[in-house]
Structure formats: C-alpha cells, structure tokens
Amino acid sequence: MKSTKIIIKTKSKIYPIYFGDKILGSIGRIIKKKIPNIKKIVIIADNKIPPFFLKKLIFSLKKYNTKIYKITANEKSKSFKTANKLIERILKDNLNRSDCIISFGGGVVSDLSSFISSLVKRGIKFVNIPTTLLAQVDASIGGKTGVNSFQGKNLIGTFYQPDFILIDTSLLKSLPQREMICGYGEILKHSLILDKKFFFWLNKNAKKMIYKKNKILLKYAIIKSCKIKSLVINKDEKEKDLRMLLNFGHTFAHGFEGARNFSKKISHGEAVLLGMIMASKLSFDKKILPLQHLNLIKNHYIKLNLPMNIKRKFKKNEINKILNFMKKDKKNIDKKINLILLKKIGMATKPNNYKVNENELKKFFLKEFV
Ligand SMILES: NC(=O)c1ccc[n+]([C@@H]2O[C@H](COP(=O)([O-])OP(=O)(O)OC[C@H]3O[C@@H](n4cnc5c(N)ncnc54)[C@H](O)[C@@H]3O)[C@@H](O)[C@H]2O)c1
C-alpha cells in the first residue's frame, strides 16, 4: 500500500513519519531497513485495540523475537509505578540498547513507552505506531515523553525522539466517536495558532472527517497537522520558546483534568477543547482577539458539537481546584500563570508574553458561571 513520508529534523535526531491507509503490515520491512540490527522487540500495546490489528503487526514482525505487553490506557496507568514495572520486565527479558520498543496505542501508551525507551539502558530503539487520532496528530510527534505525578500531569519526563513513526489511518476504524472528537481538538489547535487557511478548510470539511471518518479528509488533516507541529519542533525541540505555542488551551486543560482527578469524566482531548475556547474568550476579554474571530471560533464549536460549556462539566465551587492545578503547570516560572493566547485565527501570542494572576483568572471563570 502506498505511503507518504515526511521528515522530522530536530537537533537531536532526524527521522521519518510514514502515513497511509492499511500500511501496518509494512512495519517489519521498514524496521529491517531503518534499524537493521534489532533482534528483540517489545510491543507495548493498548488492550483496547482490536486483536485483528495486533495480529497483523505480529505477523509483519515474525522474523524477530517479539514480546507483547498489554496495558490498560488511562491517566492513572500513565504513572511512574507502571513505568517501573514495565522497565523491570524489559530488563528481565534482556533487551539490549540495539533492541526495540514499539508503542502501539494512543497518547497514554505513547508517552509511557517513549519515557521507558529513553530510560532503559540509557536509551533503546523506539518506534511509535499511534492508534488514536490525538496520538497521530500530536502525542507521537515531537519527542516529549512523560508520566503523571500526584502533583499534576506530565510532571515527570524526558525528551526522546523515536527512530520512526508509522501512521496508519485504518487503525482509527475502531476508535470511538468521543475519541475522534478529542483528537480533533489538537488538529483545530494547530490551525488556530499557526494556519488560518487550514482553519477555514476544517470549517468546511471537519464534520465529514470526524463523524464519517472520511479517509481522504483524514489523511489530509493528519499530514497537515503533523507538518505544522514538525515546523515548530524542528525550530525548538526542547520547548525554550516557540514550542510553547503548542500549549494553547493546555494550561486550562491541565486545570480541568486535575480538578477531575485525571479520571475518564473528562478526557485530555475534551479538556483541551474546553481549554481552547476559554483561552479564546480570555483573549477577547483582554482585547487581544477581535470579536469577529471569537465568533468564528464559537460557531465552529457549535457546528461540530464540540464541548464548550464549562458549566456542563464543572461547578462554581470547583474553580479553586482548577486554578490550583493551573498554577502547577511546568510553564510557570513565577507565581503568575503563563498563558498562550490568540491574536487572531492563525496567530497566537508570543511565549511568555501573557502572565495572568490567580485573582484575574478567578474573576474570568466566575463570569462563566452567571
Ligand atoms: N507527548 C506529547 O507531546 C503529547 C501531546 C498531546 C497529548 N499527550 C498525552 O496523550 C494522552 C491522551 O492521548 P489519547 O487521547 O490518545 O488517549 P488514550 O491513549 O487514553 O486513548 C484514548 C482511548 O482510546 C482507546 N484506544 C486507543 N486506540 C484505539 C483504537 N485504535 N481503537 C479503539 N480504542 C482505542 C484507549 O484504550 C483509550 O480508552 C494524554 O495523556 C496526554 O497528556 C502527549
């Protein structure tokens, strides 16, 4: 099956992303070509992925000594405890630095597997096969690895780039609708912060893409999204400045997820969608974003039935809890909360330009509850 390739060029590593529909079966051939010295492979797989896909993956890897570790993917399992258990198993199975870990799952499995890969024997070969829309357009790209702490999300982690990424759109067949919407949040984010034309393309095509899983539209949006993200990380791999743009809506999102104890009550993607509409409203309140642009964004949310009403998800008395988690965000360097806001559709504010104090944010949240 024909695949498209883009190259990621970060300071620490240059590697390809292969895109296509039904290209999972070519993984063995790609591994042989790209990482020829591998003998053992550990696949860390999400246990919700249909067996058909796993069989296909294993069949393609039949020449290798392959082990499968299945895990339950949720924010609770994205922990140091799980990472430690898996690392002990990998060491017991005696993998060498020249052997390989394959992540076969969504953002949770991807963050966890890449974290483990960066630690085992100070770095083992790593291949990422993202199986959710969110992981295909965001989590698998850029080399941020991590696990959650009781103190907050993604507070423990490393930067570690894979040897290659394989994105097969047919893996999205079994993905629930709720997860398609979650992944869409990150696609929308890429358009809002950096590409106005893409936003208008999404406004026209996203409904068919999310709700009908139209393959042609999906491939276009996934590749476009990966290209936007790769442009950013190629310039700033370690999040010193430009990469912070990708946090648009995410500081709010961390607050929402934290306030729900990282449970399934609000998923990461839903929190990001809610976070982006809040960040857009705040941008308007602070006279940074014109009303016309805010209305275009609001109408887009309405048209696609995206989560946008904080009152439906939270109670007024939970504002302090949300704020507490927002304050713990890694991007804050002083007591203020560091936010990426929007100047217009396709253009975000520069990193570290908007720091908001807790009281100001509290007043802003309270207005949402009247
Ligand atoms: N490292 C990064 O740069 C980065 C970027 C964005 C998000 N993230 C992280 O990604 C995580 C969210 O990722 P996610 O939304 O993919 O969540 P996830 O990994 O929890 O997957 C969502 C759900 O889909 C199921 N699933 C996965 N693939 C499936 C398939 N093909 N068919 C059916 N079900 C399937 C999972 O079991 C899970 O229930 C968060 O932890 C977030 O912090 C990381």
Image (cartoon, grey):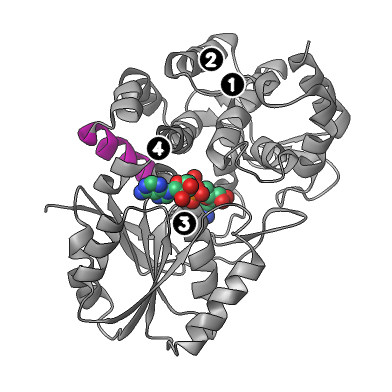
Front position among marks 3 and 4: 4
* SS at mark 1 in the image: loop
Front position among marks 4 and 1: 4
Stretch in magenta: 215-227
Identify the amino acid type marked 2: Lys
* SS at mark 4 in the image: loop
Cα–Cα span, label 2 and label 1? 8 Å
Q: Give the x, y percent position of residue 105.
A: 41, 56
Between 278 and 53, the one nearer to me in the picture: 53
Instruction: Check residue 222 for magenta coloring.
Output: yes
Query: Circle 4: is it few (<14), some (14-19), or many (20+) Cα within 10 Å?
Result: few
Cα–Cα span, label 1 and label 3? 28 Å
Cα–Cα span, label 4 and label 1? 20 Å
Q: Are marks 3 and 4 in contact (CB under 8 Å)?
A: no
Q: Are marks 4 and 1 in contact (CB under 8 Å)?
A: no
Q: Are marks 1 and 3 in contact (CB under 8 Å)?
A: no
Identify the amino acid type marked 1: Met
Horizontal side of 250 relative to 190 (left or right) equals right
Q: Give the x, y percent position of residue 141.
A: 43, 54
Q: Which residue is mark 3?
A: 142
Horizontal side of 264 relative to 165 (left or right) equals right
Identify the amino acid type marked 4: Pro
Q: Sequence order check: which comes first, mark 4 or mark 2?
A: 4
Q: Are marks 4 and 2 in contact (CB under 8 Å)?
A: no
Front position among marks 2 and 3: 2
The residue sitting at 84% across, 21% down in the picture is 363
Q: Sequence order check: which comes first, mark 2 or mark 1?
A: 2
Q: Which residue is mark 2?
A: 298
Q: Which residue is mark 1?
A: 308
Q: Sequence order check: which comes first, mark 3 or mark 4?
A: 3
When asked about the image quadrant of residue 78, the answer is bottom right
